Image (cartoon, helix red, strand yellow):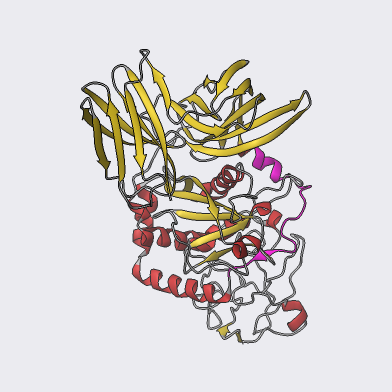
Amino acid sequence: MKYFFWLFATIIYLSPHSLIAQAAHDCGTDHDTHLQLAESIVKLRQAISEEEILFLKNSRNITYIPVSFHLVADTNGLNKPNLDIPHIALCMLNNDFRPYNIQFYFHYTLPIRIYKSNQAFYEDAYANYPSRINNQTSYALNIYIGKNASRTAGFYVYSGDYIFVRDRYVFNPQNPNNIYKTLTHEVGHFLGLMHTFAPWSNINYDSVYANRNAPTIFNSRPVENKARSGSQKNCDNSGDFLCDTPADYYSQRNYCTFIPTGKDPYGETISPDKSNYMSYFNDDCMSSFTAHQVDVMFRNIIDRGWHNRAPVNYPNISGNYIHHLSPINNDTLIVYNQLNLRWAHLQGASHFILQLFEIIDDSTSLLIHENFVSNSSIQLFDNNYTVNIPRNGKYKWSLQAVSQTGCMTMNADDIYFIAQVQEAPSVAIHELNTELPFNIKIYPNPIIEGTPITLNITAQYNTRAKLKIYTIDGRLIGIENIYLQAQENHITLQYTTLNTGIYIVQLESKVAMVQSKFIVL
């Protein structure tokens, strides 16, 4: 069993020999968004006092923010980013925000989902991003991770209150030693921060104003002076509206050794903070937010209402191994087209990354299924997941458990088994006697989202039973106690809020269990 703490991986990223990330791709958060952020900074500065911020900081050790990741796929749900990207991203955020007592965790019920986007958004998220996206997770930080976005590594959409970032600027397996601060930068925008070089976006200062003083007005906004006191001070209403971030006119990527020569409108040579996460110096320069930036973020947290959330203790994964229940190593199974994978609940796991491989020969295996499985249902002793098996053969399945904060994972040993595929019966049955006591018919099937579920259950004798509704990944979402007569019983279940997907109805009595699937469109 292998534990891995992603905190250690961050030490690798901080190697002085790291390659430069984002040299050609910058933040796509646009000028209009910065105008909205500036307005928000001024409004919240007036509405939320320093005393309120201090009270929040002193009232708890850490402020927690729930995160839902949306992996952008094409219209068929394919070609999505790798499933390990979210926990790498979450752990990096936690490492960067830990000095400021802000931490992030996987949302309990919607930690990750596959977002089937329209083709235009999939092919170029920056050129075709919507102002709002339906079905976002409420009261959470929504992060969309995709593969394609022209001219940008990531961006924040103020109107839709979501972040998009390209997967290669979270983690690039081809250059694993690269430093990536794109997501930290975009979360800074989400929490109310502007670029330190506002309003100089997309302008190469040195090529336009080389050897000259900067103008007093640029892009319809006052240019920030270097002075932090006296009559030349204007940092409260220019630049990024903060006085502990030095004046910065550089919206082009620069190395950490770069020596600025820019002059403010009074001829004073500016000295930008190369270590600031909201600057455009290369990612290996970045390491900090300023105190005033932290105050802006806490004002934003208060305004969102997240400051009222009680501190939550999210334990690391406990236990020494992941306990596979079925199939176990070297099993030979008769499979009715679909295989039910089962493993024991693991304390502290937010979700599992599951992979199923077909063994081609001794040195070759083919990935035929990959998904994440939520571990949110603690009512079940074991987790269940159903997956299609294409044909007779040898297979292996692997599991990786991920902690709530993303910084700890546990890898299970691969399990090898042989599957003998048979035609699936219409109803799966596990009997404690030799007779079939129930027959379930669901109609219509598929059903339309928002309509009740109607069941016809034929029973051979009068009995009490339980009806349970599960998601396809084994999460219990409903239970009903019913009485069946020895006849055809008509039962209507008012589960009208089910999302589109595949569900399982399970009928249990003292002597038998029958289950059947239905689809919500």
Quarter-of-image position of residue 509? top left
Q: Which residues are magenta?
A: 9-29
Query: How far across and down, in percent of the image, does residue 346 sit?
Result: 47, 27
Which secondary structure type mostly characterizes the magenta part of the structure?
loop
Q: How many marks?
A: 0
Is residue 160 depicted above or below 337 in this figure?
Answer: below
Magenta stretch contains residue 93: no
Residue 64: where, in percent of width, then height? 43, 47
Question: Where residue 201 sits in the image (x, y, percent)?
Answer: 64, 74
**Looking at this view, is 295 or 458 the one in front?**
458
Residue 247 placement (x, y as % from top left) = 61, 72
- State whether residue 117 appears in this view: yes
* Residue visible at 61% across and 41% down in the picture: 84
**Residue shown at 66% from the left, 31% from the top:** 357
Residue closer to the observer: 181 or 257: 181
| Residue at (43, 71) in percent of width and height | 40
Q: Is residue 10 magenta?
A: yes
Determine whether 295 is above or below 217 in the image: above
Quarter of the figure with the N terminus: top right
